[in-house]
Amino acid sequence: MIIRNEQQDDINIVENLIRDAFWNVYEPGATEHYLAHQMRKHKDFVKELDMVAELDGKIVGCIMYTVGRLSSEEGITKKCLSFGPIAVHPDYQRKGIGKALIERTFELAKELGYESIIIFGHPSNYVARGFVSCIKMNVCVGNGYFPTAMLVKTLVDGAFDGKRWVFKESEACEFAMRDAEEYDKLFPHKEKKILPCQEEFFIYSHSRLHE
């Protein structure tokens, strides 16, 4: 398997892969391929960490990063990273491809000088990669809210210095649903379904931890 930077010729393949990987997982249909499309245009998009996994000449996985911001109660601000979409083609899942993409980009992120990575995801998918609950690192979102799905990975010891930090995701991750739906019309038709996994995602994404 080769892990390399995404190239211009890969974009359509990658967006179709992302669409296939996320279709009906978190909601009927998917919007992650549109998110990827939009992220590439934003100043917070990290091209150096825009990677694909290639197996036997076929792109089977991808990962994309944006820069987020952290601010402390003392008025200190600094950058951090977030990844997503991260996707592996359904035919190649559970083969270590996502793990390889994550670990390779962790190395590169540290070389680029980043101290931490903050994501929203299902804990069972990421705790084995060194992510911990945001509450353990005293990282919250506005108004002291600790989302259950917010996970933190430190790349450098002492990255948070015991202070409380407020995380703000990049505006690159914001989009209008109607725009995503219009963009999806450019792709082959796929049936939208309501599945139990969508309710599980809703519960995780709308719950919080308490100190």
Image (spheres, rainbow, N blue to C red):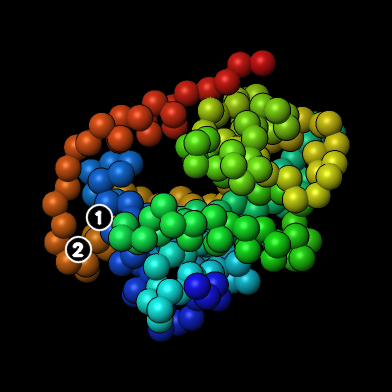
Q: Report how many numbered discs are placed on residues in the image.
A: 2
User: What residue is drawn where x is 62% and y is 58%?
Assistant: 103
Alpha carbon distance from label 1 to label 2: 7 Å
Task: Name which residue type carries label 2.
Answer: Lys
Q: Quadrant of the C terminus?
A: top right
- Residue 2 appears left or right of 116: left
Task: Name which residue type carries label 1.
Answer: Glu
User: What residue is drawn where x is 57% and y is 20%?
Assistant: 209
In the rendering, at what x and y percent does residue 70 appear?
71, 43
Residue 73: assigned label: none
The image quadrant that residue 151 belongs to is top right
In the rendering, at what x and y percent does residue 75 appear?
82, 38
User: What residue is drawn where x is 48% and y is 60%?
Assistant: 97
In the rendering, at what x and y percent does residue 61 appear?
43, 64
In the rendering, at what x and y percent does residue 63 appear?
50, 61
**Can residue 129 be seen at all in this image of the molecule?**
yes
The image quadrant that residue 55 belongs to is bottom left
At numbered mark 1, what does the secondary structure look like: helix, strand or loop?
helix
**Can residue 33 be seen at all in this image of the molecule?**
no
Q: Are marks 1 and 2 in contact (CB under 8 Å)?
A: yes
Residue 181: assigned label: 1
Reading the image, the residue beneath label 2 is 185
At numbered mark 2, what does the secondary structure look like: helix, strand or loop?
loop
- Residue 198 appears left or right of 67: left
